[in-house]
């Protein structure tokens, strides 16, 4: 039996939360750019929960912006999908299955652009949400009257301009909240700046820009939930047997959830999500939440990814059952990242958050693959790690050994051994080939013939990658070069063992 509106009757039980049939008649209050699992597992989860509580009373029209994949599964299942929440929360095992009816339909930008612009003119619309990955919020000076424009910011500007033309200048029904969830600093404000620059490039009149300022609220936001997506075939089969139906869109998610939105009372009113879940936070300043998440959770993920992968450990949970990896993650997070967060964070707060991260990483129900964390690896290092590295040197005037080891492992992982004819790049470590999914892979391929010293020096010194010359930090280049060589000669696990030995000797000498 395939999950759909017609198969919902009689499904509800203590083990499964199902939507009410009335939910299918709710208006579309949200336009969402992106079909990814993070959006479906967090913002869409909250909206579905609000609908179950009878408070938000609206659904999400989703725009699929890329040509990759198709929308067949959404069509076949009436856009219904199951969220299987698994993990530990405050010492309690959590096992929850929810059929979400938050999404009304999935449109493709190439084929359904007229329908998307029609949604833009609806008085029901109150919220636009995006997650177009870290590289999606980029300025591309183009004509917004293309059908559709290529870049996400141009698509958004076209949507907002269509709304402007449909509403009177001072019509309060035109008001919208635009929330970016991409993992870049000041995501909403950065998107806003690009939209205004595109409006100037397009030659749109001053009345439109004044309307934007009055009616459109661009918000920074932070999303924090591990949503690895569709489980592997074996786990999926077990879940579908338990649930009694098949679901091609089923996703797994951890219990922890946070959507921090930067905004005031008017943003909170327009969203209409107050009191729905403790994980929804609307405050004028959310920087502390971003720093804790980006540095402690994402930063430790990023630094440990190559170490774990090159050690032959496929998932995060498996790494936490291996004492050396768990020890590395704990130490790099608590001893090096936490004290060097480039923001004023109370020690008690960072300590409590780091303990939560350890529990979340140890979640046995979530198969979060390290290889997936290496997607756009270079950008993640730049955003999540480099600011902490620089601040650590500023405060302590020495090399953070665990951060350096993570950087060395990243450099080993990024060694390109071959490129395919269709533009894919591959690396090899200890005889095993893996794919490198990073926009900088071609850059690293060009350095494949360099010696270890030249390779480390050139990459660290590249201001185009890091916006600063990391090679001038005292001792960093030498430490990373030595670790890089050791990984290649002795293997990752031996390198990790020796790193702990040296760390303990350093502590004893002090």
Image (cartoon, rainbow, N blue to C red):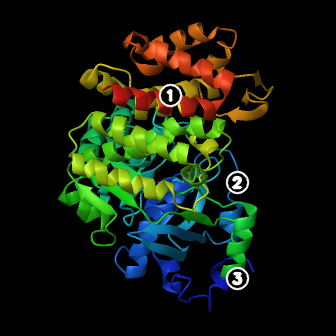
Q: Can you name the residue that lies furthest to the bottom here?
A: 10
Left or right, residue 304 beside residue 190: right
Classify mark 1: helix, strand or loop. Answer: helix
Instruction: State how far apart marks 2 and 3 are (Cα).
Output: 25 Å
How many labels sit on residues?
A: 3
Discs 2, 3 touching: Cβ within 8 Å? no
Seen at 65% across and 60% down, the residue is 230
Mark 1 — residue? 405
Real-space Cα separation, disc 2 to disc 1, in angstroms: 40 Å
- Compared with 112, 480 (above or below) is above
Q: Is residue 94 left or right of residue 195?
A: right
| Residue 295 rendering spot, x and y as whole percentages | 37, 40
Which quadrant of the structure image shows residue 248? bottom right
Q: Nearer the viewer, residue 122 or 36?
A: 36
Q: Quadrant of the N terminus?
A: bottom right
Give the CA distance from mark 1 to mark 3: 47 Å
Residues under numbered marks 1 and 3 in contact, where contact means CB atoms less than 8 Å apart: no
Q: Earlier in the sequence, mark 2 or mark 3?
A: 2
Residue wearing tag 2: 70
- Among numbered discs 2 and 1, the one appearing first in the sequence: 2
Residue 356 x %, y % = 38, 57
**Residue 244 bears which disc, if any?**
3
Work out which quarter of the rendered image holds the C terminus and state it.
top left
Q: Quadrant of residue 332?
A: top left
* Label 3: few (<14), some (14–19) or many (≥20) C-alpha neighbours in 10 Å: few
Residue located 59% across and 53% down the image: 368
8 left or right of 343?
A: right
């Amino acid at each position: 039996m395939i999950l759909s509106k017609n198969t919902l009757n009689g499904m509800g039980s203590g083990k499964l939360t199902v939507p009410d049939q009335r939910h299918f008649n709710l208006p579309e209050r949200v336009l969402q750019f992106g079909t990814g699992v993070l959006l479906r597992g967090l913002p869409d989860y909250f909206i579905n929960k609000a609908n179950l509580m009878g408070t938000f009373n609206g659904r999400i029209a989703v725009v699929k912006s890329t040509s990759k994949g198709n929308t067949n599964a959404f069509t076949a299942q009436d856009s219904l999908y199951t969220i299987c929440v698994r993990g530990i929360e405050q010492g309690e095992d959590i096992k929850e299955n929810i059929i979400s009816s938050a999404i009304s339909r999935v449109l493709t930008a190439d084929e359904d652009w007229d329908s998307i612009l029609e949604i833009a003119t609806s008085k029901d619309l109150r919220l636009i949400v995006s997650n177009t990955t870290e590289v999606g919020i980029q300025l591309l000076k183009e004509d917004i009257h293309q059908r559709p424009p290529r870049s996400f910011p141009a698509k958004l500007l076209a949507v907002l301009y269509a709304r402007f033309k449909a509403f009177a200048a001072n019509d309060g029904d035109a008001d919208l909240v635009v929330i970016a969830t991409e993992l870049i600093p000041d995501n909403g404000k950065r998107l806003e700046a690009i939209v205004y620059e595109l409006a100037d490039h397009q030659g749109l009149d001053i009345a439109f820009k004044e309307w934007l300022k009055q009616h459109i609220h661009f918000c920074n936001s932070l999303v924090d939930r591990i949503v690895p997506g569709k489980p592997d075939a074996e786990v999926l089969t077990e879940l579908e047997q338990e649930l009694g139906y098949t679901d091609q869109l089923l996703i797994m998610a951890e219990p922890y959830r946070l959507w921090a939105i930067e905004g005031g009372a008017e943003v909170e009113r327009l969203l209409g999500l107050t009191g729905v879940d403790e994980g929804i936070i609307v405050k004028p300043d959310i920087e502390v939440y971003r720093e804790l998440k980006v540095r402690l959770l994402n930063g430790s993920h990023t630094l440990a990814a190559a170490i774990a992968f090159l050690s032959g450990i496929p998932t995060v949970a498996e790494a936490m059952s291996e004492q050396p990896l768990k020890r590395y993650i704990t130490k790099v997070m608590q001893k090096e990242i936490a004290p060097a967060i480039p923001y004023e964070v109370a020690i008690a707060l960072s300590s409590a958050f780091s303990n939560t991260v350890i529990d979340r990483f140890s979640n046995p129900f979530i198969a979060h693959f390290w290889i997936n964390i290496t997607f756009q690896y270079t950008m993640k290092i730049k955003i999540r790690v480099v600011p902490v590295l620089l601040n650590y040197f500023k405060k302590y005037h020495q090399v953070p050994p665990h951060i350096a080891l993570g950087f060395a492992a990243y450099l080993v992982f990024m060694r390109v051994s071959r490129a395919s004819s269709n533009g894919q790049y591959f690396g090899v470590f200890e005889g095993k080939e893996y794919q490198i999914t990073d926009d900088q892979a071609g850059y690293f391929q060009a350095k494949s013939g360099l010696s270890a010293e030249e390779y480390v020096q050139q990459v660290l010194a590249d201001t185009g990658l890091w916006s600063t010359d990391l090679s001038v930090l005292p001792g960093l280049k030498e430490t990373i070069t030595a670790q890089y060589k050791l990984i290649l000669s002795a293997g990752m696990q031996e390198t990790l063992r020796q790193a702990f030995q040296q760390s303990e000797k350093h502590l004893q000498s002090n």
